[in-house]
Amino acid sequence: MGRVIGVGVCLLIVAMDIAAGIMGIKAEAAQNQEKHLRLWLFECKEPSHKAFMLGLVAAALLGLAHILANLLGGCNICTQDDLQKASPNRQLSVACLIFTWIILAGGLGMLVIGTLSNNKSRTSCGFTHHHFLSIGGILCFVHALFSVAYYVCATASQ
């Protein structure tokens, strides 16, 4: 019964991260369909409501997938001494946990910057914000890999 639940949790985390990645890439495509005028580093463009909504949903799904993986993975190492005395499997789970936090920070940051550039109140000109949504979407796929690796290693070492 425990394996079935574990496989279900892994599939749910992967599905949420993949959906977030696809929505981030689709938000980039929707953003690129809007009219824009570019002069060197500066760009004037119309914000895309579709790109804003897709980016917002992608950021929310990435956050939910991260919360789910961390809550259900349950790392029990608190100090440096615990980490040094832990089994290699538990040390691998801590490394994957650290990587998931780093990837979350990068991916969520990219998705938020790309989403905010498509907010209706931002019709002004400024520096280009190219590919933030698609890079954030790609980082969602990477987050899925490390989240599943963390969950599997953390639950296998308990």
Image: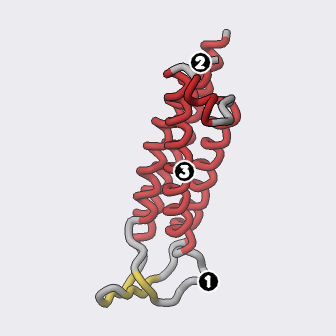
Q: Amino acid at mark 1?
A: Ser
Q: Is residue 102 left or right of residue 81?
A: left
- What residue does disc 2 label? 157
- Front residue of 122 and 148: 148
Q: Going by the picture, which residue comes out furthest to the top?
A: 1
> Which is nearer the N-term, disc 3 or disc 1?
3
Which residue sits at x=61%, y=43%?
A: 66
Q: Is residue 2 above or below residue 66?
A: above
Q: In the figure, is residue 68 to the left or right of 35?
A: right
Residue drawn at x 58%, y 23% is 85
* SS category of the residue bearing label 2: loop
Position in image of residue 82 (x %, y %): 63, 28
Position of residue 2 relative to residue 62, above or below, is: above
Q: Residue furthest left?
A: 40
In this orientation, does residue 152 appear?
no
Q: State the SS at label 1.
A: loop
- Give the distance between the C-alpha atoms of the residues marked 1 and 2, in whole angstroms: 49 Å
| Circle number at residue 104 | 3
- Residue kind at label 2, given as amino acid type: Ser
Q: Position of residue 45 (x, y in %)?
A: 44, 83
**Nearest to the observer: residue 34 or residue 10:** 10
Q: Please tell me whether mark 3 or mark 1 is closer to you in this view.
A: 3
Q: CA distance from mark 3 to mark 1?
A: 27 Å
Label 1 CA crowd tier, 10 Å (few <14, some 14–19, many 20+):
few
Instruction: Specify few, some or many for label 3: CA neighbours under 10 Å numbering under 14, 14-19, or 20 or more.
Output: many
Question: In the image, what residue occupies the spot 56% across and 38% down?
Answer: 97
**Image quadrant occupied by the N terminus:** top right
The first of marks 1 and 2 along the sequence is 1
The secondary structure type at the circle numbered 3 is helix
The label on residue 121 is 1
Q: Amino acid at mark 3?
A: Leu
Q: Which is closer to the viewer, label 1 or label 2?
A: 2
